[in-house]
Amino acid sequence: MSSIAITGGKIIDGTGVDPLEVGVVLVEDECIAAAGAVGEVAVPEDVQVIDASGMTVMPGVIDCHQHVGTGYAPIKRLQESLRRGVTTLAQVTGGPEAAKLRDAIESGIVGGCARYHVGMVVSCTFGHLRRADGNVEGVLADGPWEVRRGVRQMVQAGADFIKTSASGGFQWGDEALTFRNYTLEELQALVDEAHAWHRRVMVHAHIQPGINNSIEAGCDSIHHCALIDDEGLQRLADSGLWYVPTLHITSEASYNNEHWKRSMPHMTDRMEQASPIHREGVRKAHEMGIPMAVGTDGKAGDAMHEMMEMVTCGLSPMDTIVAGTLNAARVLGIDEMTGTLHAGKKADIIVVDGDPLADISVLYDEAKIVLAMRDGTREMVQQGFAVR
């Protein structure tokens, strides 16, 4: 058995409770054996000790919404994500090949990667997720019974969850955010079928009627809502549905991206126009107590930028850490496995040279993530400090 004790650091456990100013996390192989204050957790004599004095120990961050590409690109993205402190990444437009990579990571054939949670697409013809083609990202399906067949195909292909769309988006020049994608009837069939196979449903929606339709259909999480209105906010509050706002995609960092401005000016214009409305919606959602989780629509490390954006909308640093750890694990349905520093859970842990409760942006500085581990000693990345 391989054991490590991370000692002396401030411990943020991911639940939102006050941190332990000086604590210990004991890791045995892939799991957390114990976590608590110094003196309360017995540290065996033969363990490796990581001195995290002056640093912060917290759960690895979870990004509930990424697109990582195909071929070798996902491996590079997953490895970089782990180095940046993102220990679980949800691919929202995966397919059979993504499921194979997930299994290779879990079996240890491919190393150094964040945990890979694979979503597969069931989309309507000409919808926002139109690239689904049955081989790469998912299937195109129209009408309730065809939708049900599409869900079954994706479950058979190994989907961890189903992704669909209820409105248009920023990306395509021949679409508008106001385009309705799936009808309420189709969404209800999709959600019912996915739940019958114990799969969660994530819905892309920016505006009405897609927002209300997603809520009424009973999806598990709704993503983006860049142009959400007061009715949609109230319906979200009443439903208890998870909201993944992906503020990163309407941030200045995205709409001022020089490559996108040259190649897809229609997209960056839409992002910039939506930005203030999106942020006002998130501010109101927080005030109304709508549960939120971190997702980016971005790249490795952008989960930390998302957390910075959430703080500008009124969430506290602790709120955002919970959104990026426990809440994100709950969105993916893996909170019994990860998301907090509790005994018995996977040792998905990062050590940060700084205090994110004082300055959340410290998480965005790659050099400040001095240690990241997924599944404990099985996948551990050290950057610049010693284990004794």
Image (cartoon, rainbow, N blue to C red):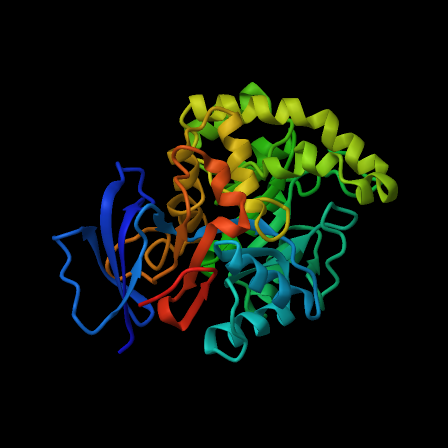
Viewed as shown, does residue 333 lie left or right of 151?
left
Residue 240 appearing in the image: no
Quarter-of-image position of residue 42: bottom left
Give the residue at x 48% y 41%.
Answer: 362
Is residue 348 or residue 358 the one in the foreground?
A: 358
Residue 177 horizontal/vertical position (percent): 73, 33
Viewed as shown, does residue 12 lie left or right of 209?
left
Q: Where's the C terminus, which quadrant?
A: bottom left
Give the residue at x 49% y 27%.
Answer: 235
Residue 193 horizontal/vertical position (percent): 52, 56
Residue 96 horizontal/vertical position (percent): 63, 70
What is the number of callouts on the image? 0
203 lies above or below 252:
below
Residue 358 horizontal/vertical position (percent): 40, 32
Residue 279 appearing in the image: yes
Give the residue at x 65% y 30%.
Answer: 207
72 lies above or below 67:
below
Q: Where's the N terminus, which quadrant?
A: bottom left
Viewed as shown, does residue 221 lie left or right of 127?
left
Is residue 151 or residue 347 the one in the foreground?
A: 347
94 lies above or below 351:
below
Is residue 347 or residue 385 the one in the foreground?
A: 385
Give the residue at x 41% y 49%.
Answer: 352
